[in-house]
Amino acid sequence: MNRRLGLLVAFVTLATAVLLVGVVLLCPLQTPISVVRFAPAGIPAGVLFWIGMSLIGSSLAVRMPGGSLMDVMFAPLVAAFSLGGPAAAGWVGIIGSTQAREIRGQVPWYGVVANHCAITGPAILSAVILQSIPFRSHTAVDFAATALAALVCFSLMTLLAAMFTSLRTEEPLWSALRADAGGYVNMLALAPVAWLMAQIYIVAGWWAVLLFAVPLYTTRLAYSRFVEVREMFTETVRSLAEAVDKRDTFTSGHSHRVQSIAMDIGRVMKVSDSDLEALEWGGLLHDIGKIGVPDSVLLKQERLTREERALMNAHPALGAEIIAPVTHLAAELPIIRHHHEWFNGSGYPDRMVADEIPLLARILHVADAFEAMTAARPYRMTPLTTEQALSELRKFGGVQFDPDVVDAFFKTKWSRGPSDSTTDEAADVPLIGHKAGVLTGPGRNPGAA
C-alpha cells in the first residue's frame, strides 16, 4: 500500500468511525424497522433482519469486465436506512457489506477496511439527507426522496471506490470513475426495488420481503450470465488470435501484447469504454488476415519480392473480410482493415491520410509497430531496445504514425523500459522504414508485425 493510499484509507476510516459513533449516539433507530409493526421491542430484530439480507446480497457479488464487483446488497441497504434512519445505515453498512472473499483472507486488511467504510460512510450521509426531506408521508414524495438518497449514496460509494482504485493502480481518477459508470444502470434498477422492499416490510411484514429474493437473485444471475458470455467470447477470440500467431514462432503472443499496449494508449487518450472494448478485441484480431498468407511469405527471412509484399499487404483487407460476418465485431472492422495505414497516406490498403484513418486504427498501429520492433522477427533476429524503438516512433511521428498517439504512448508504462548504453549511431538506424514509399516496393517493412 503506497503512502497516498494509506492516508486516504486512514482519513475515510476515521471519518466513517466518527459518523457511525455520532449517529448511534444521536440518532436512535426508528420504529418502522421493527419486525413487530412500530413496536420498539422489535427494532433490534429488524436491524438483524436487514443485516442478514445485506449479507446475502454481498455474497452474490459478480466481478464485471472492468474489474469492479457488482452485487445486490445496495437494495436492502437503502431499504434499511429508509426504515431505520442513519443508525440503521451504519449498522447494516458496516456489517452487511462483509463478503466471503474477506472471510477467506483474499482481501488485505486495509482493503477490508476501505470497502466497508466506502459503503458505510455514504450510506449514513444519504440516510441523513433522506431523514431531512419533509412530507415523506406522501407516497410520491417518499419514493422520490428514497431515489434521491439512493443516487447520493451510490455516487459517493463510486467516488470513494474510484479514488482507492486510482491510488492503488496509479491510473487517472477519471478513468477509474468511467470504469464504474455502468453501475448507475444497476442503481436505477435497484433503487425502486429498495423502496418497494421497505413498503412491503411495513405493510405485510418481514416474511414478505423474502419474496424479493427471487428478483434480486435473477438480477445477480443476469450479471453472471453477461460476464460468462463475454468471457467465453473473449477466450474464443484470444484462441483464434493465438492460433494465427503460432504459425510463426516469432510472433507467438504478439496479438495479446499489442492488445495490452493499445488499450493502455486508449486509456491515456481517454477513449470511451466501448472504444476500449473495440481495442481489446481488435488488438487480438488485427492480424487474423495472415491466415491467408502462405508460409513461404509469412516466414521468409530474406527480403520479400514485390509480389510477396503484395500478398503480405493484403492481410488487413482479408482480415476485415473474415470478420465482417460477425456482427458483434462491427466496431473492430475499421481497426483490422486500417491498422497499417500511414499518417502521410503511404500505407495500405486504402491509402488514407491523417484523420481519415480511424482513431482506434491509429492507436493500434503504434502499438503494433512498437511490439514488432522490440521483439525478434525472422527478418531481424536482434530486437530493438526500448530506447531505440521510442526513437523510431518519434522520428516517424507525422509520417507513419499519428503524433498525438505517439505522445500518448510515451505516457504509458511501455515507454519506461530499462535504459541501455546503445550509441546514438545505433539508435539512429531507420528501422521502421527508409521512406514513405517502401511499403509497396520490394523488401519488408522492418517495423511491421
Image (cartoon, rainbow, N blue to C red):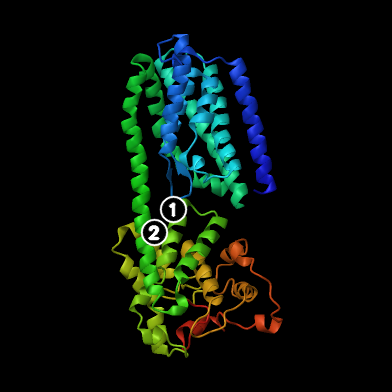
Per the image, the residue denoted by label 2 is: 331
State the residue in front, 238 or 188.
238
State the residue in front, 418 or 50.
50
- Give the side of residue 262 with respect to residue 226, left or right: right
Q: Element under label 2?
A: helix
In the image as oriented, which residue stretches furthest toward the front?
104
Amino acid type at image mark 2 = Ala
- Give the side of residue 405 with respect to residue 188, left or right: right
Q: Mark 2 or mark 1: which comes first in sequence?
A: 1
Whether residue 373 is visible to the viewer of this picture, yes or no, is yes
Instruction: Give above or below for 163 relative to 368.
Output: above
- Give the side of residue 419 with respect to residue 162, left or right: right
Residue density around tag 2, few if under 14, some if 14–19, many if 20 or more, within 10 Å: some
Image point 44% across, 65% down: which residue?
283
Residue density around tag 1, few if under 14, some if 14–19, many if 20 or more, within 10 Å: few
State the residue in front, 218 or 183.
218
Image point 48% across, 30% down: which residue?
96
Amino acid type at image mark 1 = Ser
Per the image, the residue denoted by label 1 is: 274
Whether residue 136 is visible to the viewer of this picture, yes or no, is no
Q: Element under label 1?
A: helix
Percent coordinates x, y for residue 226 in the rendering: 35, 47
Percent coordinates x, y for residue 29 in the rendering: 52, 15
Q: Are marks 2 and 1 in contact (CB under 8 Å)?
A: yes
Percent coordinates x, y for residue 117 in the rendering: 58, 34
For residue 316, which quarter of the picture?
bottom left
Q: Which mark is residue 183?
A: none
For residue 5, which quarter of the picture?
top right
